[in-house]
Image: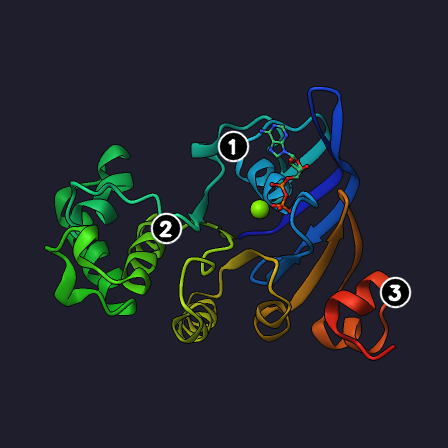
Amino acid sequence: MGSITLKKVTKNFDEVNVIKPLDLEIKDGEFIVFVGPSGCGKSTLLRMIAGLEDTTSGNIEIDGQDATHTPPAKRGLAMVFQSYALYPHMSVRNNIAFPLKRAKVSPAEIESKIANAAKILNLTDYLDRKPGQLSGGQRQRVAIGRAIVRQPSAFLFDEPLSNLDASLRVNMRLEISELHKSLATTMIYVTHDQVEAMTMADRIAVFNGGIIEQVGTPLELYQHPVNKFVAGFIGSPK
Ligand code: ADP
Ligand code: MG
């Protein structure tokens, strides 16, 4: 479970159209990267998929069901933000537990889910710390942990690594790719970083001014860019 289909979705902010009619089929289990310059609508579309922005027209289907007007909490998706969005006064354990407590999951089940996520993310020794006592990479792992325990049908990442320094970013890229392999859950990953897109994606959607110029595997885009914009953005010699 975790296929997402966009059918002619658009978005206007007041009178300004920022997403043009856009179609996209995201397959269950795939790692798709939205890439493109700043301001081209990547975050807006991700937030529409999450239900954090309403859709001006068109439809969003999740696992074949219309979810265009479904509230965010009922979409079964988990968003991971660049800013981590952790609660500074809460321990790592309570930050991860927060969505589960709200969903009235039993304490025993919460404990086992936290232990499992902490193991996957190498956070076992840090569960009693506060976010302020963690490195940037560890904070990002806590944010991912909070998403994992909800067992979403898809993870939505919005530039999750852009606050990290270069060497840490490379590590976290690998960790997120490993996580994708082990969970086999759909991931939509927004970035303006071509290297991130080329190294992490099963498929890349290249955005430009509210449209998708091309969708394909990194190799397809590199070898057969449909236009100069895609070629330039992907770094293809053509
Ligand atoms: P990206 O994530 O690709 O950098 P965004 O989706 O954030 O781009 O923004 C796309 C366009 O929509 C930009 O022109 C931006 O200024 C505009 N925009 C985004 N959010 C809002 C908002 N809440 N109100 C008005 N305009 C917005
Ligand atoms: Mg953005």
C-alpha gap between disc 2 and disc 1: 16 Å
Give the amino acid type for the residue marked by disc 1 in the picture.
Leu
Q: Earlier in the sequence, mark 1 or mark 3?
A: 1
Q: CA distance from mark 1 to mark 3?
A: 33 Å
Q: Measuring from the top left, give residue 53's x and y in whole percent.
A: 57, 30
Please state which of residues 187 and 65 is positioned toward the viewer in this rendering.
187
Look at the numbered disc 2 and say if its residue's Cβ is closer than 8 Å to ligand 2. no
Task: Pick whichever of labels 3 and 2 is earlier in the sequence.
Answer: 2
Q: Quadrant of residue 101?
A: top left
Q: Tell me: 226 left or right of 122.
A: right
- The residue closer to the viewer here, 137 or 202, is 137
Task: Pick the residue in front: 67 or 216.
Answer: 216
In this view, 230 is above or below 155: below
Residue 147: mark in rendering: 2
Label 3 crowding class (10 Å Cα cut-off): few <14, some 14-19, many 20+? few
Q: Is residue 141 left or right of residue 158?
A: left
Residue 228 got which mark? 3
| Residue 97 position by quadrant | top left
Secondary structure category for the residue under label 1? loop
Q: Position of residue 31 (x, y in %)?
A: 58, 63
The quarter of the image that holds ligand 1 is top right
Give the farthest residue toward the top.
14
The residue shown at (38%, 72%) is 168
* Whether residue 113 is situated above or below residue 89 in the rendered picture: below
Kind of residue at badge 2: Ala
Eye-nearest disc, 1 or 3: 3
Q: Which label's residue is closer to the chain start, 2 or 1?
A: 1
Residue at the extreme front: 165
Badge 2: residue crowd in 10 Å (few <14, some 14–19, many ≥20): many
Q: Is residue 73 left or right of residue 137?
A: right
